[in-house]
Image: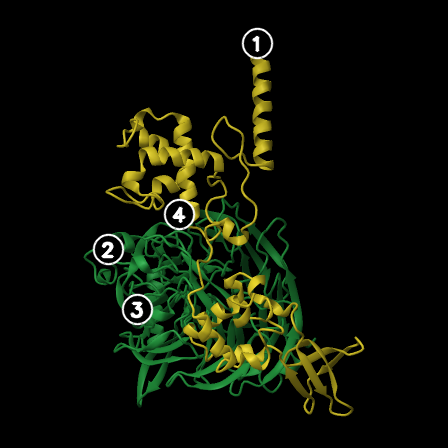
Amino acid sequence: MRKFAKKCAVAASLLTFTATLSLAQAPVAGPAGKPSRKAPTGGGLLAQAGKADKHIVDAEAADRGKKAYIQECITCHGPTARGGQGGSDLVRSLVVLHDRYGSEIGPFLKKGHRTEGSPAAQFSQDKIEDLADFLHLKVNDTMRTSPLFRAQNVLIGDAKAGQAYFNGDGKCSQCHSSTGNLKGVGGKYEAIDLQQRFLFPKPAFGRGGKPTVVTVTPVTGAAVTGNLVQIDDFNVSLRDAEGEYRAWSRIPGLKVKIDDPYAAHGELLDRISDKNMHDVTAYLETLK
Amino acid sequence: MKRLKLFAAYAATTALVLGQGALDPAKLLKQPTDSWPTYNGDHTGQRFSPLKKINSTNVQNLSLGFIYRINAPGATATVFKGTPIVVNGVMYVTIPDHVWALDARTGREIWHHVHQSKGGIHLGNRGVGVYGNWLYFETPDCMLVSLNLKDGKERWAKSICDLDQMYYASVAPVVVKNHVLVGVSGDDLDIPGYFESRDPETGELQWHWSVVPKKGEPGFETWPNEDAAAHGGGMTWGATTYDPELNQIYLGTGNPQPVIAGKGRQGDNLYTASIVALNPDTGKLIWYFQPSPHDTHDWDNNQVPVLYDGVIGGQKKKLLSVACRNGWFFTLDRATGKAIVSKDYVKTNWAKGIDSRGQPIPNPDKEPQFAGALVSPNQGGAANWPPPSFSPDTGLFYVNAARAFSVWYLYDTDDKPEGWGGTDRGGWSEALLQAIDYKTGAIKWSHKWEGSGGRSGLMSTAGNLLFGGDTSGNFVALNASTGEPLWHANVASSVANAPISYELDGKQYVVVGAGDTLFGFVMNGK
């Protein structure tokens, strides 16, 4: 008996050790007694919102939960669980937000919450967990990391008016043409990307795109022209036509002239109306 | 004499037994000299140093005294986004979950405290607050933690928000009398914003101010229903300033929620996106001014409300100025909240004019639309959390600003939008350091940085200098009167906080963080 007790103690301590180790190495997430779940990757900083041990939604379970929700809950709580005919908003419910795999939703339902189909007090554990997955999915749908977080139809403009603006007040035709550098552009990009590209063509952080050309005239010596590498109040550098890196301190007398190929687009932002913007988007979309 | 009386009243409320390294509370009521004892240097929010050993005639000789690089294996946010605090020759710096005590003369580490996190957004930490022998900092997992100044040992940790509702905490607590003032963050779900005072000895709640009023309270009428108000947002992640004579604290409140899709919260949505004056002893609202009624652009109004005395119409006034994220500059009478100046400090396109209170009137056409609305400024705003500075010597308010455009889209087609419900995309911007005349809102001088982005906080000094970061990874000193750049050091990363200055043993130090490194500059002699 003593031997058995000792064996049990060793086993227990090993189990404890194993559990501690596994917790430290990879936190287990998911309903008790079921395979652990992995948090989705990506989302960056925004994906950090909430507790580290937050509920991780299983898509298949959420789909089963959706069926249960339609059967039991949708009449009162609405199609998106944001409240409806007398039912509260479940996306904003503290019971749901504090829940992990049915830990809060289960006891709440077991108290006998009114449902449309079978009595809530008799819900199986699996059904409760599936409902929990569905409700957490509905919460996630409102998050910035949700795949539902995307633009709607932006094609509300008048293409003919857009063409007139393109060739007139917009001054776009001074550099672009529908049969030249914009030929087929409407088939190349989604409408929202066309809208973004004509307003903000310069790539973020200056990466890629057309180079900014700079001409530096030193205090003595000839002017040098090349593609701008870096400029601030104190220094300027460029890469010249031969590919040589050239740099100067911006001392008194040194002249710097910058030619930004996107300058006209920046200037456009101050005068284009939202109607013009929608019309030009619609026009560009026709260039297929 | 008035200052002595105020200090006597202040000290009576604190009744501290001060250790050797403790903060003398009188320092919070003076311009900082041998210390930088609170987030803004003092309670005014001016970020003005009266030191002038380093000045516009000799700043070209400023050189590197020390560097300190973050050593925090496993940390996910290793950028100094807070303001260092200096008390009795020791500097306290933070990143999320980490606090270091450094020798303010050398940058050498004295101790390092690590908080074991349970989650939350690790966006940044703005620094510590100090009271007597203790310091306080907030953590992404919603804790207010107090440490001993001398050894960094934890005294207690109190929960100040609910991680499951996706709050998090990043604010530098400000200590006013015996109140540790704490704010909260969180924009992912629709949750109510609030501001609290905690007991410095125990961390227990002293008072709780709800940003959005409840049914029956003034301001509730600016919400369509109780549900919208109860989920109306208004986070409190900015820095608080304090006038001991008026016994008022001033803070900005964040945007309403849902953030972009305002369909379900028609009305002005008080007291979100506002400047408010509260009684520091009770948390009662004294007055409000709302720069962004019914905001739908994520334009939190958490920028620093800067306090100073000025002359308006020949009369000396107690004033408050703020350069808001929405691109507008306001000067208010801080006793009453009445607007004296309302003017945009970069060109904007979202307001139709101003109302009788001096508040901008939003143009509904410039609210986010399903097909997009072109708006200036963008989501990042004309200003954001990096603190501005005010120089009583020049009478100028300085802010590192952005003039920016983006297209704002509604995403959520539901009858009851929740969460963000949309966002802005794309962008064009230019970076401008603006020096604003507080009496008129006119731009006295403007310095355009080459490039865009990378804005930093600022500090002005009695040496006629203005310190801040440019868009190219330089730490720069400019002539505060003219805006002429006078000195720089390439610190290799954007200056992600605001510089500070203090004098120890006759040497004036200027300290700034850039990326994961803290730089201390001095006039190097022997």
Q: Quadrant of residue B185?
A: bottom left
Q: Which quadrant, please, contains the N terminus of chain A?
A: top right
Callouts 4 and 3 on one subunit: yes
Q: CA distance from mark 4 to mark 1?
A: 51 Å
Q: The residue under label 1 is which amino acid type? A: Arg
User: How far from the left and from the top, in percent, is residue A85?
Assistant: 24, 43
Q: Is residue A39 left or right of residue B184?
A: right
**Dots 2, 4 in contact, CB < 8 A:** no
Q: CA distance from mark 4 to mark 3?
A: 33 Å
Q: Is residue B303 left or right of residue B125?
A: left
**Dots 3, 2 in contact, CB < 8 A:** no
Q: The residue under label 4 is which amino acid type? A: Gln
The residue pinned by badge 3 equals B247
Q: The residue under label 3 is which amino acid type? A: Asn
The kind of secondary structure element at disc 3 is loop
Residue at 70% of width from left, 85% of height from top? A215
The yellow-tinted chain is A
The residue pinned by badge 4 equals B165
Q: The residue under label 2 is which amino acid type? A: Asn
The residue pinned by badge 2 equals B225
